[in-house]
Amino acid sequence: MLKVCSFLPAVTQMIYDMGLADYLYGVTFECPKRALDEKQPVVRCVLEGKAYTSTEIDALFSASKHQGKSLYYVDEHLLERIAPDVIFTQDTCEVCQIDTACTAAAVAKLEKQPQLISISPESLEDVFKTAVTIATAMGKEEKAYEYLDLLQKRIDIVIDSLRASRALTKRVMLMEWLAPIYNCGHWIPHQIAYAGGVDMLSNPSGDSVVTSWEKIVRYNPEVLVIAPCGFTIDRTLEEIHLLTEKEGWENIKAVQENAVFIADFDLFTQSSASTLVDGIELLAGLFHPSSIKVPERLITRYKNLSEVKAIN
């Protein structure tokens, strides 16, 4: 039977979503818990288990990039034992996961050379197309179309609900990092649009970039969503003071209207089709609470910052 390794969590998630996990033999340390309970982690990172701040993490990745090094590495002995036929890798972000060049170097010595398939979407449409690429490589193309049909129906429900309620587009911002502050890019602006918002500081289908605090204050978002890449809600709250202590914080409309939300990163920066649709449903409920309710299963995936501060 075909043996597959997934070197990025988004692909692993989609493989499970499409019912193709029997073909999966190796994953990364960042993959969903279910996969880590069942499969062997082949990709590791030197930062595993270390509690660095946002500033320190940014500095470490910047230094490694400048030196031409990677903070990720492959367990080559385990990979050789698995002897995969296909390895899914990526080139969207060398900070978030291991890239194709690093993977190619690791497999170069293998007796059996696997096919390397880079899954590197830029837009939300690209993400949906990657499901077809993944399933086709595993000889199960029809699984992708069944999967995508269900996801499109969920998006249609959001669109129809917003139209029916005549919801006005909200001026929003979603942050991908805190220190320094990064705007959102790639598919996230498209998620925001489906949810009835517009992020005019974002970079649709492109990389997220450092964004000045002064620009954010001038933009004055009505809703602010904070979801640093790789951070859970609790991890983000440990560093939320980096924003709340800034001059002008209290003057931002989102702050004044208690519309600042902390959310789990994987609803946005993990590019599996299902988790991004979850993100659309969550954002729609946060942007337009009178028109759409946040699905019950997503209630634990975000917190309103004003409620957290009230408890503390």
Image (cartoon, rainbow, N blue to C red):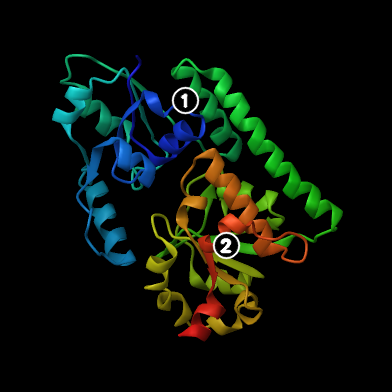
> Is residue 198 shown left or right of residue 69?
right
The percent position of residue 75, horizontal first and vertical second, equals 17, 35
Q: Quadrant of residue 3?
A: top left
Can you tell which mark lies on residue 134? Answer: 1
Q: Which residue is mark 2?
A: 299
Instruction: Say which label, 2 or 1, has the lower sequence index.
Output: 1
Q: Amino acid at mark 1?
A: Ile
Residue 252 at what x, y percent from top left? 61, 78
Report crowding for label 2: few under 14, some 14 to 19, many 20 or more residues within 10 A (C-alpha).
few
Q: In this rendering, is residue 85 above or below 243?
A: above
Residue at point 26%, 38% (across, down): 41
- Residue beneath the point at 57% across and 74% down: 217
> Distance of mark 2 from mark 1, alpha carbons?
30 Å
Name above or below for residue 156 compared with residue 137: below
Q: Say few, some or many: other residues with alpha carbon within 10 Å of mark 1 (under 14 / 14 to 19 / 20 or more).
A: many
Q: How far across and down, in percent of the image, does residue 125 sit?
A: 61, 35
